[in-house]
């Protein structure tokens, strides 16, 4: 029973981590790019670049978060 409860809370924790790993970098880079575009009047150039950077960082973070699970299944 305790092991089942532990697995549930571990999965819940992992879900929260994934949510924040996806949302925070993307939102932060999008807002930062939009701010720079407004400042330098280059809309949408810097927003697209910063969004792309945010996506790459998100992919990197998520990959290294789930890497232990991928190695465990091998």
Image (tube, rainbow, N blue to C red):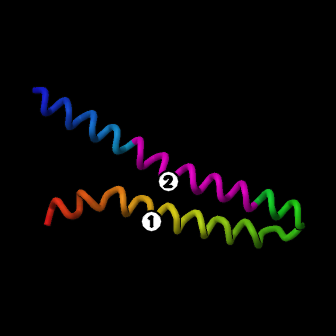
Q: Quadrant of residue 71?
A: bottom left
Q: Is residue 18 magenta?
A: yes
Crowding at dot 1, Cα within 10 Å, few <14 / some 14-19 / many 20+, comes out as few
The residue tagged 2 is: 22
Count up the numbered dots.
2
Q: Residue at x 88, y 61 (%)?
A: 39
Most common secondary structure along the magenta stretch:
helix
Q: Position of residue 28 (x, y in %)?
A: 64, 53
Mark 2 residue element = helix
Q: Is residue 7 left or right of residue 48?
A: left
Mark 1 residue element = helix
> Mark on residue 60?
1
Q: Quadrant of the C terminus?
A: bottom left
The boundaries of the magenta stretch are: 16-33
Q: Is residue 38 above or below residue 9?
A: below
Q: Residue at x 58, y 63 (%)?
A: 54
The tag earlier along the polypeptide, 2 or 1, is 2
Q: Is residue 50 above or below residue 9?
A: below
Q: Is residue 61 above or below residue 8?
A: below
Q: Position of residue 31 (x, y in %)?
A: 71, 54
Q: Pointers 2 and 1 in contact (CB under 8 A)?
A: no
Q: Position of residue 18 (x, y in %)?
A: 41, 49
> Mark on residue 23?
none
Q: Is residue 28 left or right of residue 58?
A: right
Q: Is residue 5 magenta?
A: no
- The answer for how far apart the CA atoms under marks 2 and 1 are is 10 Å
Q: Position of residue 10 (x, y in %)?
A: 27, 38
């Amino acid at each position: 029973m305790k092991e089942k409860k532990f697995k549930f809370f571990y999965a819940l924790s992992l879900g929260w981590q994934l949510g924040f790993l996806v949302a925070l970098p993307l939102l932060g880079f999008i807002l930062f790019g939009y701010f720079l575009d407004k400042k330098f009047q280059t809309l949408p150039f810097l927003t697209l670049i910063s969004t792309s950077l945010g996506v790459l960082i998100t992919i990197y973070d998520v990959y290294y978060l789930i890497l232990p699970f991928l190695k465990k299944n091998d």
